[in-house]
Amino acid sequence: MNKKNQGWLNQYLENCSKQNKSIHTIKNYKSDLDKYLLWYEFTFNSPISAKKKDIIGLYKSFLLNGGLLYKKESFLRRLLRFRPKKVILFEQSPLSNNSTKRHLSSIKNFYEFLKQTHEDHSNLFLINPVKEKIHGIKVKDTDITHTPILPYEQWRILIESTYRTRERLILQLLYWGGLRLSELTQLKFSNFDSQRKTMKVIRKGGYIHEFHPQRFDEIMKDITFLMRDAKSDFIFTNYLGNCLSTRSMYNLIKKLLKVNCCDEDLGPHSFRKACATNLYKKTKDLLLVRDYLNHHDAKVTQTYIDIEPTKVQ
């Protein structure tokens, strides 16, 4: 792989590790980006900083239709006119729309990282070439595994059966705050302002979003209790005092759901969907819910709102 491309990839993966992303997630990012960089170098024979036309459109076609990449013969072999021996680098089988969309999402995040890290000192990555309106893929409903919503009845049993302050706070932040796993694990005591009744969350892309969470007083009560014996500014830590990994947090939440006999297909994102649905039914304001969950597009927010009648507290 080109040394520059390899260097940028290593920086991105290192940043993912610093953000406490799970080993599984980083492994998937690396697999997607290794494939993309290999294809890019085979196609353009240059580092990804070179400005090429419709890179992502070409790569999307490669993923959807499949193809072969061959190892290019050396200059000496071409000079001596030896019969070229094609060595396959890898074979790409045609991917489904859903898998292709995931690949493009990985590439988009990678370019967004390069754009942000170079904007102050370089003109290399001024524009993210992955443009949703141009390169978006319509995914059939049958290709999507819908996130099930956490029913109110199961939420009530879950919260009433959880006595440990730390675990109860996790459930409250998921259900009333609608936080993602990565946002939950990165929370600090200093992110909460008891006077203004706000909390700050590090959202995707690394920027800070400050908002007024529902049930703030209940949440703050548990925050204050945990703060008494805290050895770190991070709220949820492991035995070393470091913030929990998203994998550890995921396992903890699934354990709480299982112990309380909740549906097996429920997960952390089920709380976020319940938060969106309940908030919309209270306010009837889609844009408010969009801003609360920190979505860029209200169409995404609509997918989180369950139109079936559910009990809301």
Image: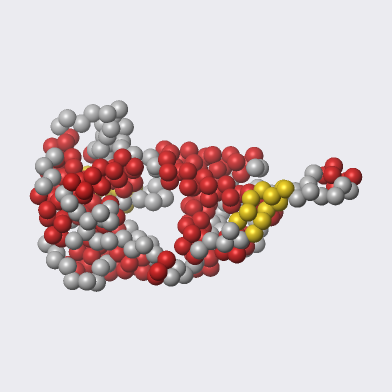
The answer to whether residue 14 is above or below residue 29 is: above
Residue at horizontal 26 percent and vertical 47 percent from the top: 254
Quadrant of the snapshot with the C terminus? bottom left
Image coordinates for residue 80, horizontal then vertical, percent:
90, 45
Quadrant of the snapshot with the N terminus? top right
Count all numbered tags in the image, as a single digit. 0
On the rendered structure, is 72 left or right of 298?
right
The one nearer the camera, 185 or 213, is: 185
Image coordinates for residue 74, horizontal then vertical, percent:
80, 44
On the rendered structure, is 25 left or right of 104?
left
The quadrant in which residue 56 appears is bottom right
Whether residue 193 is visible here, answered yes or no, is no
Residue at horizontal 18 percent and vertical 71 percent from the top: 309
Residue at horizontal 31 percent and vertical 40 percent from the top: 248
Whether residue 88 is visible here, answered yes or no, is yes
The quadrant in which residue 146 appears is bottom left
